[in-house]
Image: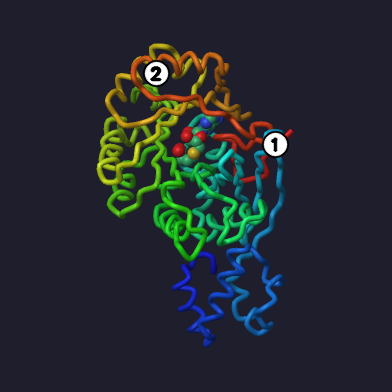
Amino acid sequence: MLLDLSLLELKEYVKNLGLPSFRADQIFDALYKAKSLEEISNLSKEIKEKIANYYPKYEILKILESADGTMKMALKLEDGSIVESVLLKYKYGYTVCVSTQVGCRMGCKFCASTIGGLKRNLSAGEILLQVLLFNKIVGGTVKERGVTNVVLMGCGEPLDNYDNVTKFLKLLSSKDGLNISQRNISLSTCGLVDKIKKLADDGFSITLTISLHAPNDETRKKIMPIANAYKISEILNACDYYFSKTGRRVVFEYALIENVNSSAEDMLELSKLLKGRSCHVNLIPLNSVKEQNLNGIPRKEAYRLMNILNEHGISATVRRTMGEDIEGACGQLRNKLGGGK
Ligand code: SAH
């Protein structure tokens, strides 16, 4: 697919087709404006025929808009796979939340994205497409982008699709493309230790977000199968390594689940665990996923727990939940048409 290619690679591709280099610029421009092949006016029918096989093919199945302005898009890809992505509006601009896999094989007990397992990885271009489509929807262009931030927090475990995801990060932050700075990109992972280290070694400096969700391994194992593969201490070591290489403060996500990980004692244990680290904790009262019988806690209670962390020297906030009415909130994305009231 042509969106998998950098401008340089596209130039090579165009050259191999026997076309002059400026054709690559024209195709690149059309791709980044999310134009369909038919909408391109400066390419002849012959050229279009030559590139048709590799030009992105997709269908926007549905766009839902939440009362708070959040939008959720369901995209049908060339092979019929469906991915969901979300657009969040903040004061400073728009953030797109992308999916990185069709489904997910991590099996976290509280997350809708993993129901049915992993179908396949998304290519770099398929991840980029989600950003480009939303950029177009909000009236952005390539030079004056509407989308300012990107979070890899949709369906899938980004570090389980390492090569495509890192290729996507390069395309997204490339000067030729949307040129979104790595500081404005967050990658969330359930904690694939080796890949966290590799990310630092490969020179990335995006914001790393860890889905921690428990103050100890025992509790974590109850809700996250990956906890059987990596201990929290190993994840924290990998975070230290990432911090030492990038200087970027790590963010920990913690979904508050009734009777599982949301007692005052849990917060005390969490403060001990994170004491002295340059980090931030994002508390998220669990969003409901109909198939799971795990419940969230009231927001008021979440603020009480946040205060406990703050009092023990841990920077923490309760995340604003957005788009819950369209099943666009954390952990609610799927690889089929999700609901919405
Ligand atoms: N696989 C990656 C990326 C997903 S990001 C990861 O695990 O980080 C989505 C975030 O939402 C993760 O922190 C995930 O743990 C969290 N999440 C999943 N289900 C949730 C739910 N029902 N309510 C609140 N947060 C949830």
- The residue shown at (74%, 33%) is 341
Locate residue 36 relative to residue 333 in the image: left or right: right
Snapshot quadrant of residue 47? bottom right
The answer to whether 112 appears left or right of 308 in the picture is right
Of callouts 1 and 2, the N-terminal one: 1
* Above or below, comparing residue 61 to residue 240 in the picture: below
Q: Which residue is at the front of the view, 236 or 173?
A: 173
Residue pictured at 52% horizontal, 59% vertical:
178
User: Which residue corresponds to the image point at 57% horizontal and 71% vertical from the top-left?
Assistant: 54
Between marks 1 and 2, how big is the CA–CA gap? 32 Å
Disc number placed over residue 66 in the picture, else none: 1
Front one among 219 and 148: 148
Question: Which disc, if any, is residue 40?
Answer: none
Residue 188 higher or lower than 181, as above or below: above
Give the camera-side residue of 302 and 116: 302
* Rendered location of residue 81, percent (x, y): 61, 54
Q: Residues within 10 Å of mark 1 (few under 14, many from 20)?
A: some
Look at the numbered disc 1 and say if its residue's Cβ is closer than 8 Å to ligand 1: no
Query: What's the image's color scheme?
Result: rainbow
Residue farthest along the right direction in this orientation: 341
Residue depicted at 31% across the width and 31% down the height? 278
Callout 1 secondary element = loop
- Asked whether the beta carbons under mark 1 and mark 2 sit within 8 Å of each other, the answer is no
Say if 123 sits above or below 92 in the image.
Answer: below
Mark 2 CB near ligand 1 (8 Å cut):
no
Secondary structure under tag 2 reads helix
Residue 289 picture location, percent across and down: 60, 30
Indicate the amino acid at tag 1: Ser
Q: Which residue is mark 2?
A: 310
Rendered location of residue 67, percent (x, y): 71, 33
